[in-house]
Image: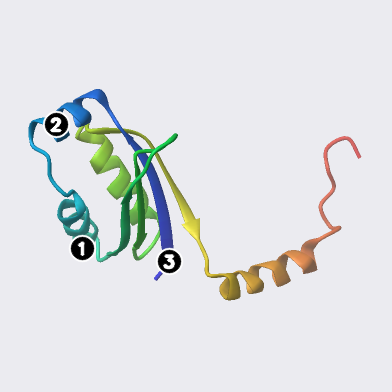
Amino acid sequence: MPIFITYASYSQDGVKGMLKKPADRTAPVRALLKKVGGKLLAFYMTTGDNDVVVISEVPDGTDAVAVGMAVAASGAVSNIQTVRAWKAKDFAAITKKAAKLAGTYTPPGK
């Protein structure tokens, strides 16, 4: 199953909710991913540009986007960014494909 890394920041409403009722948010995230046939691999609270990092496996990119949209619709988070991740050994096949294509693309203005 493809792996996705999602970054998000809590909105002001989300922070208010966390302060009103402090809790570990792992279970709700795990349950949401399970609904799309996915699996939570890791859930971290972070500092810096993002408040949350979620690493998950979901059947495909449309599921990852749908989960992000559902969470965004709650108003608790903002600035959700989801990226696809590959294990280094699996990414080698992609670089082999790219090597075959290298030099065939004509850049603009050339």
* Identity of the residue furthest to the left in this view: 21
N-term mark: 3 or 2: 3
Image quarter of residue 34: bottom left
N-term mark: 3 or 1: 3
Above or below, 37 against 50 in this view is below
Tell me residue 87's x, y (percent). 53, 70
Tell me residue 9's x, y (percent). 34, 35
Identified by mark 3, the residue type is: Pro
Image quarter of residue 91: bottom right
Above or below, 12 against 70 in this view is above
Identified by mark 1, the residue type is: Lys
Q: Is residue 66 left or right of residue 81?
A: left
Residue drawn 86% across and 58% down?
A: 103
Which one is closest to the eye, mark 3 or mark 2?
A: 2
User: Which element is circle 2 on?
Assistant: helix
Spatial CA span between label 3 and label 2: 34 Å
Residue drawn 39% across and 38% down?
A: 47
- Label number found at residue 19: 2
The residue that mark 1 highlights is 34
- Label number found at residue 2: 3
Residue drawn 32% across and 51% down?
A: 44
Spatial CA span between label 2 and label 1: 27 Å
Spatial CA span between label 3 and label 1: 14 Å
Observer-nearest residue: 11 or 48?
48
- Label number found at residue 9: none
Identified by mark 2, the residue type is: Leu
N-term mark: 2 or 1: 2
Which one is closest to the eye, mark 2 or mark 1?
A: 2
